[in-house]
């Protein structure tokens, strides 16, 4: 199993002076917290995708961690998320039949989530994503702001990462060149079925200062 950790975003909404993955969170960077969680899942390969100017710093972070036999590399990302995922895929060898794509911003994701995604793939799913139930009532609105429909809440999930796929399925989805906010949408667009497994509230995505504060509280056990 290979894991691509996407950490190439600017993180503008966080309001930090540097890319989000390199912002400190209780004594370590967001990226370091994320990589510790990834390595608990014991991947055979790991590709960390970061801004080109921070490749060296990411390599230093990796050097501080216990890779436990994991083949790890750091590569420069691209202008779009799909470019970064493709760069990570190219860094993995053909030995990785299954690939998990993980956002570094979800730096507190428990290892159990990785295990559930991987179990789904090993059971034969072509794509597996973690998701949590939606507690709010969701409305679909049109361009003018009027409600179009109200989906049944019990059918909705807020999806997280890692998102796992058969390697050839993920490669084909990215080769199709479509635009999407996550890899599952690209795979769905090709007609593949994607399984949803249980996510975890701790796998929040650090996007805003409020998210960072919440992550700090979680790490402190508050």
Image (cartoon, rainbow, N blue to C red):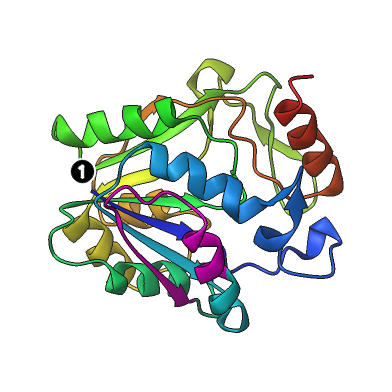
Q: Is residue 180 visible?
A: no
Q: Position of residue 76 (x, y in %)?
A: 49, 79
* Residue drawn at 70 percent across, 22 percent down: 137
Residue 8 is covered by the magenta coloring = no
Whether residue 168 is situated above or below residue 57 in the rendered picture: above
Q: How many labels does the image show?
A: 1
**Residue at image mark 1:** 126
Q: Where is residue 80 in the image (x, y as percent from the top left)?
A: 54, 74
Q: Note whether 84 is above or below 213 in the view shown.
A: below
* Residue 190, image x, y percentages: 26, 57
Q: How crowded is the residue under tag 1: few (<14 C-alpha within 10 Å), some, or many (20+)?
A: many
Image point 71% across, 22% down: which residue?
A: 136
Span colored in magenta? 58-76
Q: Foreground: 134 or 191?
A: 134
Q: In this view, does 46 lie to the left or right of 53?
A: left
Query: Residue 185: x, y in percent?
Result: 41, 52
| Residue farthest toward the bottom in the current orientation of the protein | 53
Q: In this view, does 6 lie to the left or right of 209?
A: left
Quadrant, the C terminus: top right
């Amino acid at each position: 199993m290979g894991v691509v950790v996407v950490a190439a975003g600017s993180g503008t909404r966080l309001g930090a002076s540097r890319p989000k993955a390199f912002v400190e969170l209780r004594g370590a960077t967001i990226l370091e917290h994320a990589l510790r969680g990834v390595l608990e899942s014991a991947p055979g390969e790991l590709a960390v995708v970061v801004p080109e100017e921070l490749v060296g710093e990411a390599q230093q972070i990796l050097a501080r961690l216990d890779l436990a036999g994991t083949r790890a590399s750091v590569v420069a990302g691209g202008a779009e998320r799909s470019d970064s995922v493709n760069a990570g895929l190219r860094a993995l060898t053909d030995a990785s039949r299954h690939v998990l794509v993980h956002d570094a911003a979800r730096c507190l994701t428990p290892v159990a989530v990785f295990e559930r995604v991987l179990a789904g793939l090993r059971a034969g799913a072509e794509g597996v994503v973690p998701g949590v139930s939606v507690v709010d009532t969701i409305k679909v609105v049109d361009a003018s702001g009027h409600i179009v429909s109200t989906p049944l809440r019990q059918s909705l999930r807020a999806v997280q990462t890692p998102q796992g796929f058969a390697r050839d399925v993920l490669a084909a989805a990215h080769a199709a060149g479509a635009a999407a906010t996550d890899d599952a949408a690209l795979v769905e667009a090709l007609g593949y079925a994607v399984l949803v497994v249980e996510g975890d509230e701790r796998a929040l995505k650090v996007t805003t200062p409020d998210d960072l504060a919440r992550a700090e509280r979680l790490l402190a056990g508050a």
